[in-house]
Image (tube, grey):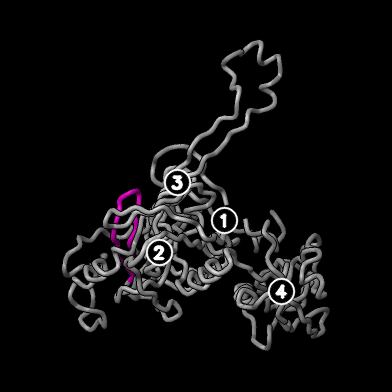
Amino acid sequence: MVLNTKTSQSHDSDASPVKKAVTYLSLMLLGAGVSFGANSFISGNPQVSANSIVPQSSQVLGGIIPPANLSTPQNSNFITKVVDTVGPAVVRINASKTVTSQVPDAFNNPFFREFFGSQLPEQPQQRVERGTGSGFIINTDGMILTNAHVVDGADQVNVVLKDGRTFAGKVLGTDPVTDVAVIKVEADNLPIVTLGDSEQLKPGEWAIAIGNPLGLDNTVTTGIISATGRSSAEIGVPDKRVQFIQTDAAINPGNSGGPLLNASGEVIGMNTAIIQGAQGLGFSIPINTAQRIAQQLIANGKVEHPFLGIQMVTLTPELKENINKNPNSGLTVDESQGVLIARVMRNSPADKAGLRAGDVIHKINGESIKDAEDVQKVVEMTPVGSDLNLELRRDRKNVEVTVQPGALPTQMQQ
């Protein structure tokens, strides 16, 4: 992940077949102003045609004409009601940090001093980087959910409510693996949101986003749920462990950390990413995931993510053929389906359990595995130190291996 560190005040900014199969686009966080609080921008060049521009009216909402038998309220004011109810619990988060730039050693060379004299800096230079994002209050005592990249490295966090009240915020914890953070403010009787169930979402449902895009506070946009279960790899952020919600509700820099709502005003996701240059492609962290991570951050200040220590790829007949034809792959694959282990990290839980490059995973704990994302889902939901029983195909033989996931090393979370 590449962090934009510009100091401005604007709002947010023929390898082997195996390598080809596991190489993805990178996520670039563009800060609101500098390095903070933006949306995540996913580099890419999707072939997406622009949506027709449709004037909004009581008959047309977000460019979609509701059918007569739509189960949601027919009165266009249902969106207004959601905003009136939830809006006060959506906050603006202003984050800042002081960055010190050290004087390069070469500048201390007498040669430079002789020619440039006082033009050279004598002491380390400091600058303040500022950014803005969004968040939402989950309990009356001041617990607030937002994105980790909104407050990453912040020295100071201020939370501004819709009614103008401002509070100093304390970051209780951040989890870069899921991009979730929890902030606490000292206050009572605050307005709160109602959390929904993101596991029940279906494409085509209404989606309402509230946040502070481009510094424009309390902005509301509408659309639908375009898809669910978008893997991190699919949208170009393979370092994340999230099955994203896709929506066409307009999400812009500064919406990061704000809520995605259903027609009943329940939070179903946390807005976090867009694909740069695309239209109608926004992504949110499912609220069930955000809530699970938040509970651990509140209790422990950190999150332990289980990991096996393998590089894997979904196996297809085409990939098998290409691997077996490539003398440089170092692998011979007999299977045409399953998940191929391409590499095993040294001294990892997988290495200690005896997993090998070339093994093909077919089942975990008796459940069939279709693709690499299935493996990641199972591992993520398994407590560190618990047993995972893997059924493999190795050298034309069926093999069973029990592995205990370890805690994801800190350096791998960055």
Nearest to viewer (mark 4 / mark 3): 4
Numbered range of the magenta stretch: 207-223
Eye-nearest disc, 2 or 4:
2
Report crowding for label 1: few under 14, some 14 to 19, many 20 or more residues within 10 A (C-alpha): some
Disc 3 versus disc 2: distance between alpha carbons?
29 Å
The kind of residue on which mark 3 rests is Ser
* Residue type indicated by callout 1: Leu
Mark seen at residue 25: 1
The residue under label 4 is 405
Q: What residue do we see at 67% from left, 59% from top? A: 410
Rendered location of residue 272, percent (x, y): 45, 60
Q: State how far apart marks 1 and 4 are (Cα).
A: 27 Å
Instruction: Tell me, yes or no, whether the highlighted magenta stretch contains residue 218.
Output: yes
Image-based side of 65 in relation to 358, left or right:
left
* Front tag of 2 and 1: 2
Q: Residues within 10 Å of mark 3 (few under 14, many from 20)?
A: many
Q: Secondary structure at mark 2?
A: loop
Which label is found at residue 13? 3
Tell me which residue sits at (56%, 16%) in the image. 119
**Which numbered disc flags the more N-terminal residue, 2 or 1?**
1
Q: Is residue 78 or residue 342 the one in the foreground?
A: 78
- Quarter of the image with the C terminus is bottom right
Inspect the image, locate mark 4, and give the three-letter code of the amino acid beneath it: Pro
Q: Nearer the viewer, mark 3 or mark 1?
A: 3
Q: Which mark is residue 360?
A: none
Cα distance between the residues tagged 2 and 4: 35 Å
Closest to the camera, between mark 3 and mark 2, is 2
- Residue 376 image-quadrant placement: bottom right
Q: Which residue is mark 2?
A: 142
